[in-house]
Amino acid sequence: MASHDGLVHYPPAPGALHFGETLIRYLNNHCRQRTLYVHLETRPNSSPHIGNLVTFATGFALAAALKHSCSRNVRVRIIYQDPGPDHHELLTIDGVKYQKGLTGPGDSGLNQTPFRRVIRRLAEFFDVSYDTCSPNFWQHNPEFTDALMECVKYRRFIGTHLSPTTGKLAIRVACPECGLVDKDGVKNGYHPDGRISCDCPQHGMFYINPAVNADVERMELGPPLRHLIRAIICSRDKQASWIMCTGADHAGLYHEELVWRLLDEPEDAPIFFYAPLVVDWSGARLSKTKRVRDGAYQYLCETRREYMVDADMFLRYPGGLEALCREVRGWIDQPYRLFRNYSVEYLERQLRLRGMLHAVH
Ligand SMILES: [Zn+2]
């Protein structure tokens, strides 16, 4: 039995019907500030694969369309996240989850990833400028403290959305004595003078003051709280408009309940733009996190498609990245193609059709 007939369909989707002809004009009209940033985010230690390369290419292609069709002053801004929960030792004491230490904004791993090479080539292909920023970029923003204190003020309401299990704000601070961190901020206290108290099971209470830069540096935020504060900060930016480009796995209930519902002034919020996902045979997006079981994608490796999950290998295929860029640019040029996901099989065919040669070993 043939696995498929090779025909590609674009069933009507509301987004495609609405934005099919007017996507770039719509984005241009709703980004009213003089400068425009297309925001992309990644972990410095992540293993790039064709899925996150597609998200990055989508961001660059979008920026290029706005630059070349609308003469916008646009720049891609790539912000590195902290390395994530897989890198912390976790323990539970008296029912409270703790992690050992914060990740911090260290960037020692950045040069070891192929991301930098990929980003440079994407910028060249699409003729768009870019910059890269450290994980504490948002914490250095002058609006950060105010946005955080706004969340603290409404923490009982916001907490039920951001942390349904605990109802708390995940403001993480390491104990100055032993480095232990209350992962979900369960024992944090909020005081009338603005200070936040944290509790170490071994060394007791300690305080931080969000109005003091050095204390802000000591904080990390759980992802939903970070996403909300980021949206608030972008909403208040009077110099630049922001388009947050991310994979479509963030779309839907997650963003609507954890960001949109909680914004005071949604009309000023950044635009969230979802890149199509690259999915495996079962429809799950490709992922290289440790949460995907060992031996995942063996079937891709056995069928000479390992390059789909290994960007280092992908970059050894002459013309591969350029073929991917041409494919993604086609989605932006014909936006009805943006409102769906693409399988590994489809992408493989398109990369060959668009000029990717066999690998150089
Ligand atoms: Zn301690």
Image: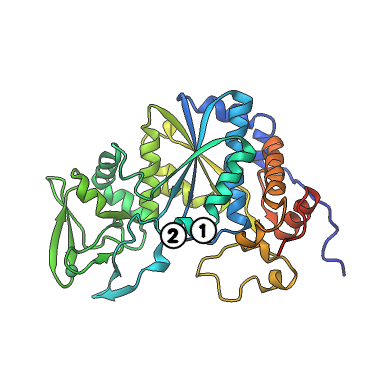
Q: Which residue is mark 2?
A: 109
Quarter placement of the N terminus: bottom right
Specify few, some or many for label 2: CA neighbours under 10 Å numbering under 14, 14-19, or 20 or more. Answer: few
**In the picture, residue 315 is in which quadrant?**
bottom right
Q: x, y (%) of residue 136? A: 34, 48
Residue 241 visible in the shown view: yes
- Residue at 63 percent across and 37 percent down: it is 126
> Disc 1 to disc 2, how far (Cα)?
7 Å
Question: 190 or 102, which is in the foreground?
Answer: 102
Q: Is mark 2 within 8 Å of ligand 1?
A: no
Residue at the location (39% across, 68% down)? 87
Q: Position of residue 2 (x, y in %)?
A: 86, 66
- Label ID, residue 113: 1
**What amino acid does circle 2 point to?**
Gly
Number of numbered markers: 2
Image quarter (top left, top right, bottom left or bottom right) of the C terminus: bottom right
Q: Quadrant of residue 59?
A: top right
| Displayed-image quarter of ligand 1 | bottom left
Task: State whether residue 236 is above or below residue 103.
Answer: above
